[in-house]
């Protein structure tokens, strides 16, 4: 603990990928998971362990979504990942042979770099980390070096789920999953897309089996408080008003087009100047309910990293993400400039890129300090800068990003006036008392309702069954509904980055749900079920096998109905 710091800094990383096991490999499917593990999760573990070995406790707050925990712990992923890494090493060897033959010295040096890189990753995965990525993050938390947050079970966009029972199930499954993998209850949660909804009377936008009757819906924070969660993170626009800063809009042309259509009718809420991201507040939208704390994403530090046009990752010296050499898929070119076409990319010089990392990290640390100094000067209070990002930005999208993270954490730790902290640690010290209300919103720029209702009715009718076969059908129905609710599919469709794959996944899980629901109704009412249906259930259980402990009763009725 530092003596009289002017403020604190918490770096928050959210790690998540949709469920892809047994759902394709390349270009969409398992290789997403393989790439993220090789380029982000293991490099991040290496950075954290290096800092600890150097005598620094990094105090990182890292979110790992339940669906990602399930996948990284699955034996099929572990076996597939080792094969993937071996193939990347072989591809580098093939490049080495070709570049040697053609006397391409720089490309040859880069090919050796990739061979060394993936050789180290497979050595770390198989040896140092014993093929247990999630367990290694748990060890770091158990030793007090990091804090791990949870997330909604399958990254469901909670404000758009039509039934409160679905929100309840997403949160309860998240808490159960966290206990399973980390041995204790979580304190914080990353709301998917930082999306929040307060309590209010709601009517479905389309006619359902219940009509368009309006009813009282609980605020998201009510579900969090009921399940023992202490805090979540919001965008500055939800706290203060003003215009949200879309974190992906610079990266996807289709999002810019969608936003352009919406922006004409959009009027941002007037900014409330008395609220600040430097403080932690309590949120409650229902009288008498336990409030939950909110940390606010700092907009200034966010833009320095998120912006692909003028943020750090857009520097022309850094490795370009998009241009790859096939076969093999290794990258040999630098960004060159923000406007460069793929054909105009220049070859990558690692030394030039590494020179930029300390410069960017130093600037970022200076920005953190200037924000804390300004707040401390104005209020005489110790504030916080909360900087949340998707983990996959570092290492995967921005190859040099993990080296940047390491230096930022070192530079902050070395400054006697800034305290490096986790969210829970700062919350315990700050003890916030001001309760505020915030509107519905997310950190974005600016469903299947009848299925949720059908699930609700099935559980209400058959949920108390003692028949193990019927329980198996209901459990698989819950898994298919969880997968349908994942916000990833809508995101991939709106960005056009994997539209066909996302539409296929939505259609597949929808068809699975409908077929299983019909099976549950027939079997539950004593009717004959064709052997082919039981074979279908077995195949679906094998393919979509996440959440072994899934409790379908969470979809049946609310534990604490709103009053």
Image (cartoon, rainbow, N blue to C red):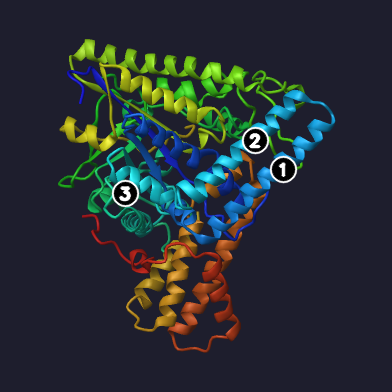
- CB under 8 Å between discs 2 and 1: yes
Q: Between marks 1 and 3, how big is the CA–CA gap?
A: 57 Å
Residue 79 horizontal side relative to residue 183, left or right: right
Q: Percent position (x, y) of residue 282? A: 22, 36
- List the single residue furthest toward the right: 102
- CB under 8 Å between discs 1 and 3: no
Label ID, residue 114: 2
Residue 347 horizontal side relative to residue 228, left or right: right
Label ID, residue 91: 1
The residue at which mark 3 appears reads as: 201
The structure residue drawn at horizontal position 64% and vertical position 20%, both measured from the top left corner, is 338
Label ID, residue 404: none
Which element is circle 2 on? Answer: helix
Residue 298 horizontal side relative to residue 15, left or right: left
Q: Residues within 10 Å of mark 2 (few under 14, many from 20)?
A: many
Q: Please state, as top left, top right, bottom left or bottom right, where the C terminus lies in the image.
A: bottom left
Q: Between marks 2 and 1, how big is the CA–CA gap?
A: 9 Å
């Amino acid at each position: 603990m530092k003596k009289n710091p002017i403020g604190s800094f918490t770096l928050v990383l959210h790690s998540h990928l949709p469920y892809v096991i047994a759902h394709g490999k390349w270009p969409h499917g398992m290789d997403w998971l393989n790439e993220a593990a090789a380029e982000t999760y293991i490099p991040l573990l290496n950075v954290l362990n290096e800092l600890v070995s150097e005598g620094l406790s990094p105090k990182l707050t890292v979110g790992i979504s339940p669906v990602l925990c399930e996948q990284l712990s699955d034996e099929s992923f572990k076996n597939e990942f080792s094969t993937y890494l071996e193939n990347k090493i072989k591809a580098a060897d093939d490049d080495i042979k070709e570049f040697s033959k053609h006397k391409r010295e720089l490309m040859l040096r880069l090919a050796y770099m990739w061979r060394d890189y993936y050789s180290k990753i497979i050595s770390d995965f198989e040896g140092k980390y014993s093929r247990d990525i999630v367990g290694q993050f748990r060890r770091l938390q158990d030793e007090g070096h990091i804090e791990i947050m949870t997330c909604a079970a399958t990254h469901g966009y909670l404000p758009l789920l039509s039934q409160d029972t679905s929100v309840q199930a997403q949160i309860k499954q998240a808490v159960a999953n966290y206990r399973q993998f980390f041995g204790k209850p979580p304190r914080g949660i990353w709301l998917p897309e930082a999306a929040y909804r307060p309590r209010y009377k709601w009517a479905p936008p389309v006619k359902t089996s219940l009509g368009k009757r309006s009813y009282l819906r609980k605020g998201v924070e009510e579900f969090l408080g009921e399940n023992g969660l202490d805090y979540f993170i919001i965008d500055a626009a939800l706290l203060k008003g003003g215009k949200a800063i879309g974190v992906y809009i610079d990266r996807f042309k289709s999002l810019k087009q969608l936003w352009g259509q919406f922006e004409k009718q959009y009027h941002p809420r007037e900014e409330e100047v008395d609220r600040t991201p430097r403080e932690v507040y309590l949120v409650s939208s229902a009288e008498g309910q336990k409030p939950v704390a909110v940390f606010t994403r700092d907009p200034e530090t966010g833009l320095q990293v998120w912006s692909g046009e003028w943020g750090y990752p857009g520097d022309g010296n850094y490795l370009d993400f998009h241009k790859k050499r096939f076969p093999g898929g290794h990258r040999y070119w630098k960004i060159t400039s923000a406007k460069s076409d793929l054909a105009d990319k220049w070859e990558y010089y690692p030394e030039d890129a590494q020179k930029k990392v300390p410069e960017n990290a130093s600037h970022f640390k200076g920005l953190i300090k200037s924000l804390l100094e300004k707040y401390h000067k104005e209020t005489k209070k110790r504030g916080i800068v909360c900087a949340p990002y998707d983990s996959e930005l570092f290492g995967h999208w921005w190859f040099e990003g993990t080296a940047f993270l390491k230096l930022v954490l070192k530079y902050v730790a070395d400054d006697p006036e800034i305290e490096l902290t986790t969210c829970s640690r700062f919350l315990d010290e700050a003890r916030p008392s001001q309760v505020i209300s915030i509107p519905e919103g997310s950190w974005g720029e600016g469903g299947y309702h009848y299925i949720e209702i059908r699930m609700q009715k099935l559980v209400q009718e058959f949920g108390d069954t003692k028949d193990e076969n019927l329980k198996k059908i209901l459990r698989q129905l819950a898994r298919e509904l969880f997968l349908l609710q994942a916000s990833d599919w809508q995101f991939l469709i709106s960005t056009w980055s994997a539209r066909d794959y996302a539409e296929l996944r939505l259609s597949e899980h929808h068809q699975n749900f409908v077929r299983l629901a019909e099976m549950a109704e027939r079997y539950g009412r004593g009717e004959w079920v064709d052997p082919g249906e039981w074979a279908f259930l077995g195949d679906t259980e094998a393919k979509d096998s996440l959440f072994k402990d899934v409790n379908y009763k969470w979809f049946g009725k609310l534990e604490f109905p709103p009053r």
